[in-house]
Image (spheres, grey):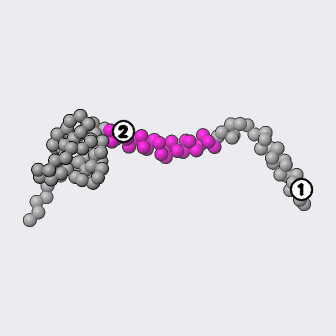
């Protein structure tokens, strides 16, 4: 019985040696394809959307920065934006640190 198992193992090893080199590279190509469509492509799309958002900033936009602080843009200068985060409190930040633009909504007056 052991002789039969040994003979079958040697036959399967001989069959593996005769396979084409493309079959050895194919799994690597498939793995790269999966990584591209699941990781690389969505990340590039997100970076492109972020860059478009930064390029379309204008004075008066309500924004959220990377630290979670909301504010309104008061001026734009090159790669920097001056953001008013409270009445009379303005900070200068890098435009690329802005996470998103908030839609302008009617302000709710609290009683």
Q: Which percent across, then down, holds residue 55? A: 27, 36
Q: Quadrant of the C terminus?
A: bottom left
Residue 107: quadrant of the picture: bottom left
Q: Quadrant of the N terminus?
A: bottom right
Q: Residue furthest left?
A: 111
Q: Which residue does the image show at 25% across and 46% down from the upper left?
A: 101
Q: Which residue does the image show at 47% across and 42% down from the upper left?
A: 40
Q: Is 32 in front, or is 77?
A: 77
Q: Which residues are magenta?
A: 27-51
Q: Is residue 21 above or below residue 5?
A: above
Look at the image and tell me whether residue 99 can be seen: yes
Q: Which residue does the image show at 15% across and 43% down from the upper left?
A: 74
Q: Which percent across, then down, holds residue 66? A: 30, 50
Please report whichever mark, 1 or 2, sits nearer to the chain's N-terminal start: 1
Question: Please, what secondary structure does the residue beneath circle 2 have?
Answer: helix
Circle 2 residue? 48
Mark 2 crowd level (few <14, some 14–19, many ≥20, 10 Å Cα): few
Circle 1 residue? 4
Give the overall secondary structure of the magenta segment. Answer: helix
- Residues marked 1 and 2 touching at CB (< 8 Å): no
Q: Which percent across, then down, holds residue 57? A: 23, 40
Q: CA distance from mark 1 to mark 2?
A: 61 Å
Q: Is residue 47 left or right of residue 8?
A: left
Q: Which mark is residue 23?
A: none
Question: Please, what secondary structure does the residue beneath circle 1 have?
Answer: helix
Look at the image and tell me whether residue 104 can be seen: no
Q: Residue furthest top?
A: 78
């Amino acid at each position: 019985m052991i002789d039969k198992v040994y003979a079958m193992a040697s036959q399967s090893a001989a069959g593996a040696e005769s396979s084409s080199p493309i079959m050895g590279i194919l799994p690597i190509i498939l793995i790269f394809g999966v990584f591209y469509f699941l990781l690389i492509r969505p990340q590039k799309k997100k970076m492109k959307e972020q860059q478009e958002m930064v390029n379309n900033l204008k004075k008066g936009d309500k924004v959220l920065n990377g630290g979670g602080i909301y504010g309104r843009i008061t001026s734009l200068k090159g790669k920097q934006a001056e953001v008013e985060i409270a009445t009379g409190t303005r900070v200068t930040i890098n435009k690329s640190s802005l996470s998103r633009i908030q839609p302008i909504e009617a302000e709710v007056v609290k009683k």
